[in-house]
Amino acid sequence: MSAFDASMEDLKRRFVVRAKKDSVVLRDHQSGDRALPPQELRAVVHRLAGCAGIFGYPALSAVALDIDAHLVEANDTSALPELLAALDVVIGENGALPG
Amino acid sequence: MSDLRILYVDDEPDIREVALLSLGLDPAIECRAVDSGAKMLEILGQEQWLPDLILLDVMMPGMDGPTTLARFRETSAAAMRTPVVFMTARAQGFERDRLLKLGAVAVIPKPFDPMRLAGQLRAIFEAAAMA
């Protein structure tokens, strides 16, 4: 494995660990246990839209980008369950990682 | 020895790392990265290291990319000539046109392809130099 590939793998692991935390935060928001202010919610979604595809998860990026657009246009969070489902897929594929 | 100096501005540390790794694939590119528009203006204000091209994230807390670009353009004559490329998850249609009208020479979508980023930016820089 090249140094580039090894570094990318490290960053991908870090992304998945953070994705697990994002999933918890978004579930808490969705359930009403801990609602995020709109700007913070958009920051989480926007980051997922920008990052996930870089680390090999284009479907997660696409869902996050779609929700990001809805948040900008109408603060619409109705598609959040789709993002949580996409996060579950990524987390499920990386179940052995800590986080 | 570098023949293309790039300053990358993005608040997201993992994406900064990926971009630095990606641009490091081209040994003739020298890239520095900062985490905010304010830091970009601070570094460029010192005039000790001036980039040939700036890669600027659009959505950042505090000062966003478009505001950073507008303030940068006010700083010097050289700042008017330095090509700026926006990077954003919303790089299509109206949003892309809006960003180009603000004075960017190109808009690169996020997520970007780490294997292609250096080549993309080199091509954009060369096209801007010819314009």
Image (spheres, rainbow, N blue to C red):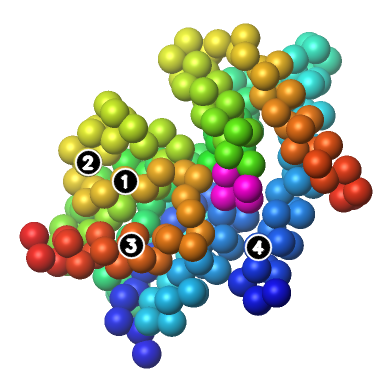
Q: Quadrant of the image for the C terminus of chain B?
A: bottom left
Q: Residue furthest bottom?
A: B1
> Are both tags, 4 and 1, on one chain?
no
Q: CA distance from mark 2 to mark 1?
A: 7 Å
Q: Are marks 4 and 3 on the same chain?
A: no
Q: Earlier in the sequence, mark 2 or mark 3?
A: 2
Residue type at tag 4? Met
Disc 3 secondary structure class: helix
Give the CA separation, mark 2 to mark 3.
16 Å
* Disc 1 secondary structure class: strand
Label 4 and label 1: CA atoms lie apart by 24 Å
Marks 1/3 in contact by CB < 8 Å: the verdict is no
Q: Which mark is residue B116?
A: none
The disc numbered 1 marks a residue on which chain? B
In this figure, which residue is indicated by the disc labeled 1?
A: B107
Query: Which disc number belongs to residue B100?
Result: 2
Evaluate if marks 2 and 4 touch, with contact meaning CB atoms under 8 Å apart.
Answer: no
Q: Is residue B49 left or right of residue A22?
A: left
